[in-house]
Image (tube, rainbow, N blue to C red):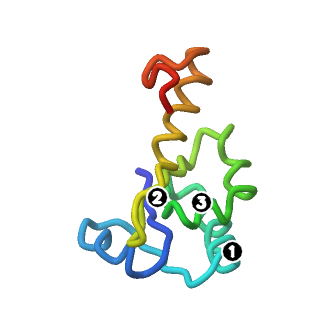
Amino acid sequence: MYKIAVLGDRDSIYGFAALGLDTFPVKNAEEAAKTLKTLDDGQYGVIYITEALQLALEEEIDRYTSEYLPAIIPIPGVSGNTGLGMRNVKKSVERAVGSDIIFNNDN
């Protein structure tokens, strides 16, 4: 069975440990990139990452978009929601069905 990891700044992710998820607090994008590479060991099926880190690690994360596992899913951090998660959902749906059937081109 695959595990679930949460990667981000400590304040944004520490609550996920109470749910039994593996948390990996990082202080900067460089540390996050190294940690992300270590999480790509076949143990993790889902990696939640704060939106701020996803923006900083966009190049590293792009190589996972065509992979089956791990699924990398952005979550809002303590600084708030940037809308990145919804944009990713829209992009995935458009890629899967060929058009925007959810948002009707509103976003």
What element does badge 3 sit on? helix
Under mark 2, the amino acid is Tyr
The residue under label 1 is: 34
Binning the other alpha carbons within 10 Å of mark 2 as few (below 14), some (14 to 19) or many (20 upward) gives many
Q: Earlier in the sequence, mark 1 or mark 2?
A: 1
Q: Contact (CB < 8 A) between labels 2 and 3?
A: no
Crowding at dot 1, Cα within 10 Å, few <14 / some 14-19 / many 20+, comes out as: few
What x and y, as percent, mark residue 4?
42, 58
User: Which residue, as the protein is rendered here, is positioned at the far left?
Assistant: 18
- The residue wearing badge 2 is 48
What's the CA distance linking mark 2 and mark 3?
10 Å
Disc 1, SS: helix
Residue type for callout 1: Lys
Which amino acid type is shown beneath numbered disc 3? Gln
At 70% from the left edge and 78% from the top edge, which residue is drawn?
Answer: 30
| Label disc, if present, on residue 54 of the rendered structure | 3
Rounded to the nearest angstrom, the CA distance separating label 3 from label 1 is 14 Å
Toward the viewer: 28 or 18? 28
Q: CA distance from mark 1 to mark 2?
A: 15 Å
10 Å crowding of disc 3: few (<14), some (14-19), many (20+): many
Q: Name the residue: 48% across, 78% down.
A: 9
